[in-house]
Amino acid sequence: MAEATTGAVIDGTVPSAQEPKSEKKKRKFSFPSAFTILFIVTIIAVICTWFVPAGQYSKLMYDTDSGQLQVTSPTGEVSTMDATQESLDKLGVKIDINQFTDGAITQAVSIPGTYEGLDQNPVSLADIPYSMVWGVIDGIDVMVFILCLGGLIGVVKVTGAFESGLAALTKKTKGREFLLVFGVSVFMIFGGTMCGLEEEAVAFYPILAPIFIALGYDSIVVVGSIFMAGSIGTTFSTVNPFSAVIASNAAGTVFTEGIAVRALALVVGGIVFLLYLHWYAKKVKANPEFSYSYEDREKFNAEWKLDESSAEGREFSWRRKLVLVIFVAAFVIMIVGVMSLGWWFPQMAAEFVTLSILVMVIGGTGKDGVGEAKMVDAFGAGASSLVPVALIIGLARGVNHVLTEGMISDTMLNAASNLVTGMSGPLFVICLLLIFFVLGFVVPSSSGLAVLSMPIFAPLADTVGIPRWIIVAAYQFGQYAMLYIAPTGLIMATLQMLDMKMSHWFKFVWPMMLFTLVFGAILLSICSIVFAA
């Protein structure tokens, strides 16, 4: 029997006894796509609205038209109050009235002590498609920004500027490849801590993915140096207006309180992440099979790798150099606009359209230009290639819509506040960190969670004798540790863009998620003792 089996293998035939095993290999589990994951999460959210008790806090907003404070009760009745500090004191909202009147806080704020249980308001399974469409409509500004980005990439690509520029870059970085990864990561960490550079960072993948492939790295390094580095910066935000500033305002303190501790955490967290990314990138560079996403390497390279053979045949002409300068300048202008000019997605999208037209003129005209028709087609093709990414962002918002319509988000918030009431300082902070970790899945928006939760949790800090800025730090560390992997956050759009499996990403990111929670718990526990009243 042994000889017969051996002979069969040598002859190239497979014995029938081996066929079932071969079948099993073919049926190897494949992790669901981003769309499937979000669909499953939406269904789970709908089911939760049937079993989790409904309830809401009264909500407070400043009405700019009337110049008054507007209070909406859990049952929907609306009343108004004078926009004065005395009115806020009566409501128990420890926030400076100027934060409302100056426009620093524009979203509805939860009023402490006003939670009321309500009749169950279950969302029907038939409403799932509607919630998805609602999320897409709600996220239309981000989606248009992404489509305009795709159009800009399309017109630049058709000029051949990417290929010829990449050929020149790889020659100059030979032997110092990680310096580019390091530089991008440091930039993203800085952008995250300063202005919460997140959705805007989607623009960097099409630039850097082909470069990192050429340098010998994989898709994990691409996402790590952009998404994860930016997330580390946002986790340990120092002056980020969408996280540290708005949360401090909603907590009734100022963002400069505790900024030294958050800066220390940023330095430690940034160094740990850069060392981890360097270790991983070095391993992949030395042995591509070490890559956590190695099984999808060929597919990833086929989609993002530029044709280096054609690049060698393309002259890096003044026209292509100018197109690349415009392309890079687009992101510099975008960052300046966000940080200094108050730009948001419509302005950024308009900038990309403007520069796309400029590239069309430069690359499409003249003797060696590609022509106007080809340029217009390239813009459309580039935009259409990012439609799935844009839809993912909308679908993720649909999950939050389900939880809001089912009126269970505030129920979770109220249960969490009751859980930590009466605890000692260090235990209180650790539990709060874990609570924000869970709430990060339910409310993935940093500013949204800040205005909903800070007025509820910040007063509890007073009862245990710790400064309110520690609550702000716990919110940042906890929420963002979840957003490294939360399907309701930005990560799903990122993985969709690069066609990466969540299982591959999780294998890389879980040590950083664990580090953030453990380091955050230790640091905040020490602060709760040192800075106790």
Image (cartoon, helix red, strand yellow):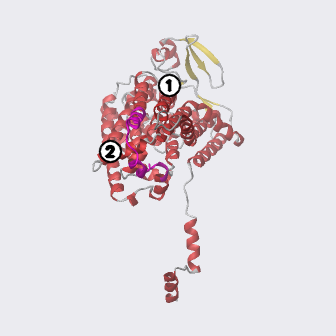
Q: Is residue 231 above or below residue 301?
A: above
Q: Position of residue 303 (x, y in %)?
A: 49, 50
Q: Amino acid at mark 2?
A: Leu
* Residue 315 image position (x, y, % from top left): 38, 43
Q: Picture quarter containing residue 16?
A: bottom right
Badge 1 amino acid: Gln
Residue with the mark numbered 1: 347
Q: Which residues are magenta?
A: 302-327
Q: Residue at x 38, y 22 (%)?
A: 254
Location of the C terminus (image quadrant): top left
Answer with left or right where residue 410 lies relative to residue 198.
right
The reply, left or right, for residue 33 in relation to residue 225 is: right
> Badge 2: few (under 14), some or many (20 or more) residues near its Cα, within 10 Å?
some
The stretch drawn in magenta includes residue 325: yes
Q: Is residue 300 above or below residue 198?
A: below
Q: CA distance from mark 2 to mark 1?
A: 33 Å
Q: Considering depth in this image, is 488 or 420 the residue closer to the camera?
A: 488
Residue 223 visible in rendering = no
Q: Which one is nearer the viewer's eye here, 205 or 169? A: 169
Q: Which residue is mark 2?
A: 274
Give coordinates of residue 319: x percent, y percent.
41, 35
